[in-house]
Amino acid sequence: MSNLNAPSSRHTVDGWLNPDRLPPQGAAIEIQLETVHAGEELTVVLAKADGTKLASKSLPVNHNDQNITLHFASQYFSKDSGRLKVYYTVGKDGPSAALEFDISDGFTGGHVVDLSAQRVPVFYHNGKIKLPKNLPAQMSFARPLTGATGYKSSNASVATVDSAGNVSALRNGSTTITATLANGDKQQYSLIVTGLVGLEVLASSATLNNAEKTCKAVGMRMPRQSDFALFKSAYGNQMGEWLPNLAIWGEAIGADSAWTFHPHTGVITGEASEKGALRQVAGMN
């Protein structure tokens, strides 16, 4: 079995290649070789996932530089190309491990940001998002369109987009990102954000009974103990900077008691919910 490393490409991201973003010379393939291969012939192959060869390039390995970059023309990377792979041989060694990737639909292809696996907590206060200090990279991505003069999100509460096409996901939901070209033409793609764990303050104080009614009225549920623990872990004492010095009601845990979370002290505890006890109201969405 060959011990050659797989090639890489600056034009593939998370197993996808966007043909709309390729430069005129095509897709760059980068290969790093050990000095022992200097003077040998390198052959790089572009193929379909089933092994059907689409193109190949051969060149001698330079004695002074074993970091090699070559390009395959953009014509090989159309939206109907299917899954592709790139591998190489050098001298009598190989084939190498393969770089495998799919072809995206370009700018107009739909995009999904699914953060279910990460359970990313997001806090909303007075209708505004308050992000934790450490965010997963998946919450932001770039999809610029060559020649675009501006971008707009149809639902900025779900995701925003800046003048360079950089998108930031904010809330579960859907939106449409539209790019405007210099001649006035527009192109757009749909964006779906899912998997965010949202906690939203609904009232500054209420009894437990009224807190439950408030959450139900807006289609939310009361926070669980595990929800409070998740937000405490992600935000630390940040929530205390935005909220008053009063605990937040959680779900009921028995007769006349419920979980509470104090945003200033970080204490999560079961608390008596006797008639008249007031706490902040927050719902999970």
Image (spheres, rainbow, N blue to C red):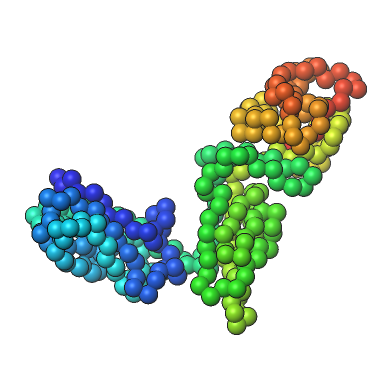
- Identify the residue at image location x=52%, y=70%: 145
Residue located at (29% from left, 69% from top): 72
Q: Position of residue 153 (x, y in %)?
A: 66, 62
Asked whether 193 or 151 is in front, the reply is 151
User: Which quadrant of the figure has residue 23?
Assistant: bottom left
Q: Is residue 213 above or below residue 264?
A: below
What is the quadrant of the N terminus in the image?
top left
- Report the side of 272 relative to 159 (left or right): right
- As drawn, is 19 to the left or to the right of 151? left
Residue 28 visible (yes or no): yes
Identify the image quadrant of the C terminus: top right
Q: Tell me how many marks there are.
A: 0
Query: Residue 47, can we see it?
Result: no
* Residue 134 percent coordinates (x, y): 57, 39
* Left or right: residue 114 compared with residue 270: left
| Percent of width and height locating residue 7 | 27, 55
